[in-house]
């Protein structure tokens, strides 16, 4: 069998583009907690077949979030992360069973509207117990099997907790690492072949790790007020992008 650095469906120019994009999107996520995953999904959608988009995006995000979790590990609040992981396991299994049965339009539209409400609507008084993050883990991991990037959805829930900027980003990142790991395991079980993409994925993960190092330095430089402003702006931008992409599917 002849070895190739790239699958036939991916051009060398596009490969270089996504490696560079991986650096910048990982930096964005490390600096403000979210945004990189949705941006990467949008770029990948221009050059990957629809059947490969979600699983390949999952591997890239696993690599990016794993590096970010390691770098920011001292600031992780493990209690909500462990609660999230319980729900994520059930959500991933359910998503694997339903992966082709739910409408993409309504899923993306609901996520986008929920994020906007969480940022700008009246703040609900979520009870501070394990059920909130268990439910969030279940729903977001179920949804990620269909829409790929649910980081803003999870971030909107973390926003209701009184964590500082370092704890918010690190804990959110740890949740995303668990979620993408579960998702990849399920796609492997469903028969997706990741082998042809390995060289490209390794290059993107390496670039993403470098971007994470740069973004983490920026995070430490932000004040709490500045971070909250940036966090809200990125959440809003990602929500509008998700809504626009869902509406675009109707055209």
Image (cartoon, helix red, strand yellow):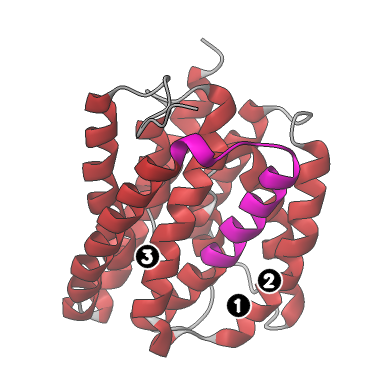
- Answer with the quarter of the image where residue 17 lies: top left
Q: Is residue 22 magenta?
A: no
Q: Mark 3 and mark 2 in contact? Answer it, CB < 8 Å.
A: no
Residue 38 point in image, percent of width and height: 42, 44
* Mark 3 or 2: the one toward you: 2
- Residue at screen point 27% across, 71% down: 227
Q: CA distance from mark 1 to mark 3?
A: 15 Å
- Residue at screen point 32% across, 48% down: 204
- Answer with the quarter of the image where residue 137 lies: bottom right
Q: Secondary structure at mark 3?
A: loop
**What secondary structure is the stretch in magenta mostly built from?**
helix
**Mark 2 nearby-residue class (10 Å; few <14, some 14–19, many ≥20):** many
**Mark 3 nearby-residue class (10 Å; few <14, some 14–19, many ≥20):** many
**Mark 1 nearby-residue class (10 Å; few <14, some 14–19, many ≥20):** many
Q: Earlier in the sequence, mark 3 or mark 2?
A: 3
Q: What residue is pinned by disc 2?
A: 85
Q: Would residue 158 be found to the left or right of residue 128 on screen? A: left
Q: What residue is pinned by disc 1?
A: 81
Camera-nearest residue between 179 and 112: 179
Q: Mark 1 and mark 2 in contact? Answer it, CB < 8 Å.
A: yes
Q: Secondary structure at mark 2?
A: helix
What are the residue bounds of the magenta stretch?
176-197
Q: What residue is pinned by disc 3?
A: 33
Residue 125 vs 93, above or below: the answer is below
């Amino acid at each position: 069998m002849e070895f190739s650095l790239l699958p036939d469906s991916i051009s060398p120019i596009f490969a270089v583009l996504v490696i560079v994009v991986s650096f910048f999107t990982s930096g964005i996520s490390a600096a403000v907690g979210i945004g990189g995953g949705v941006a990467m999904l949008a770029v990948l959608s221009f050059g990957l077949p629809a059947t490969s988009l979600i699983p390949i995006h999952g591997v890239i995000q696993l690599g990016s979030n794993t590096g970010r979790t390691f770098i920011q590990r001292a600031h992780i609040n493990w209690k909500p992360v462990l609660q999230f992981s319980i729900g994520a396991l059930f959500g991933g299994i359910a998503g694997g069973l339903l992966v082709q049965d739910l409408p993409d339009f309504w899923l993306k539209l609901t996520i986008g509207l929920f994020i906007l409400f969480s940022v700008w609507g009246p703040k609900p008084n979520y009870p501070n117990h394990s059920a909130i993050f268990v439910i969030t883990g279940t729903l977001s991991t179920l949804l990620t099997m269909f829409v790929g990037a649910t980081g803003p959805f999870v971030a909107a829930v973390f926003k209701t907790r009184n964590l500082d900027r370092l704890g918010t980003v690190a804990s959110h990142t740890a949740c995303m690492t668990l979620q993408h790991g579960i998702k990849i395991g399920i796609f492997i079980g469903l028969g997706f072949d990741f082998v042809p993409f390995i060289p490209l994925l390794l290059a993107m993960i390496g670039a993403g790790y470098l971007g994470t190092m740069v973004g983490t330095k920026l995070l430490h430089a932000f004040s709490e007020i500045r971070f909250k402003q940036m966090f809200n702006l990125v959440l809003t931008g990602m929500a509008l992008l998700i809504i626009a992409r869902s509406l675009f599917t109707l055209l």
